Image (cartoon, rainbow, N blue to C red):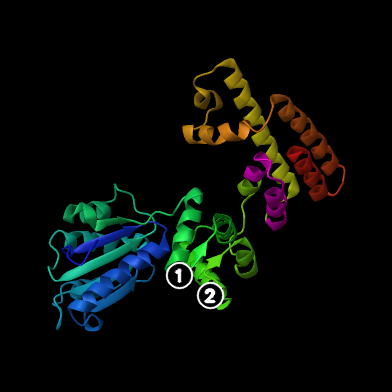
Amino acid sequence: MAGKDTPLLSAYLVVGNDELKAQTVVKRLWARLEELGNIDFNSQVLEGTREIDIKNLLDSLNTPPLASPFRVVVIKEIDKASKALTDEIIDYLASPMPSTILVMTASKLTQQSRLYKAVVAIDSKAVIDASEKKKSELPAMIRQLAGNYRISLSYDGAAKIADLVGGSTVALNSEVKKLASYVLALGKNEANLEDVVAVVSRSQQPSSWDFVDAFSRRDLAKSLNTLNALQSETPVSLLYLCVIRLRELLHFKSLVTLGDRDIAKALNKPDWQIRRLEPLAAKYESSELRDLLAKAAHADMRMKSGEDAKMVLQELILASCQ
């Protein structure tokens, strides 16, 4: 589906949580088919989350198009459809109707599933990856979205949007579009952090691990802001997670000092977690980590004695970031 001259396939499977990419794939196909004929008379959109009549679906898939070379059937969230339905689709894909294009979207579908394999059997390019972006990739993607709306966006502004909105590309696109309207109305074509704060609203609630990551990075502003935004976690539980992270960092530094070559095995953690610990550990001396663990133990005693737990945790954050 890469270009107008690329032959269309009998089926496509868009897999991943990137809703915007999934929507874009369907829209591009729709636009291409509209150029070839009347797509309104030759299309059907179904939801995998709702009960789909299998006989009616098969009839739709095998119906010749009218005044168009193609007919398109879209099934959203096929991974949530019944096994009976997916079994019928697998059988259909073994000998699909040449003039019908079946497009399916799925948040999660393993490569080992029968449906995935049935689509790949048509063509390896029939499966389109719509995996959600990593956090580190979001600012660049957000700046690209801004360009689609004729504005440029500073990196810190893009990072702030990612922090406020999260990884939903549909929500990100909506907020960037709103930001662009605001900036253009002011007669500007560049948006900065100040513009983002003025317009973009928080829709993504931070997690406890977002707080722990900020704490272990010694990021004072992010730690305090995340603590204030957290609604479902108690200061006591957050303190417990901070102690776990401080112990991990101290253990990591000790192993590095001893020259241990297999730190992942020693800590019983996957390599990707060890790679995340390394830059964090570099921010501390071992003596600082031991001191913070002692202060955390004292903070725990103060919380249990009835002191304001949030204030006690804030004091530990300040001690960590000094």
Quadrant holding the C terminus? top right
Instruction: Name the dominant secondary structure of the magenta segment.
Output: helix
Queried whether the magenta region covers residue 191, the answer comes back as no
Residue furthest top as drawn: 258
Q: Is residue 160 left or right of residue 88?
A: right
Mark 1 in CB contact with mark 2 (< 8 angstroms): yes
Q: Residue at x 48, y 60 (%)?
A: 143
Query: Which element type, helix, strand or loop, lies under badge 2?
Result: helix
Corner quadrant of residue 58:
bottom left
Height in image: 112 above or below 266? below
For residue 248, above or below residue 140: above
Q: Position of residue 1 (x, y in %)?
A: 23, 62
Give the magenta range: 212-230
Q: Amino acid at mark 1?
A: Arg
- On the image, the x and y values in percent for residue 238 come to 70, 45
Dot 2: within a 10 Å radius of its alpha carbon, few (fewer than 14), some, or many (20 or more) residues? some
Q: Residue at x 60, y 67 (%)?
A: 200
Residue in the image at 25% along x and 83% along y: 40
Q: Position of residue 247 (x, y in %)?
A: 66, 30
Is 292 or 175 nearer to us in this picture?
175
Residue highlighted by disc 1: 150
Query: Does 222 appear in magenta?
Result: yes
Which element carries disc 1, helix, strand or loop?
loop
Q: What residue is disc 2 on?
A: 184
Q: Is residue 319 left or right of residue 20?
A: right
Residue 194 makes an appearance in the image:
yes
53 in relation to 11, above or below = below
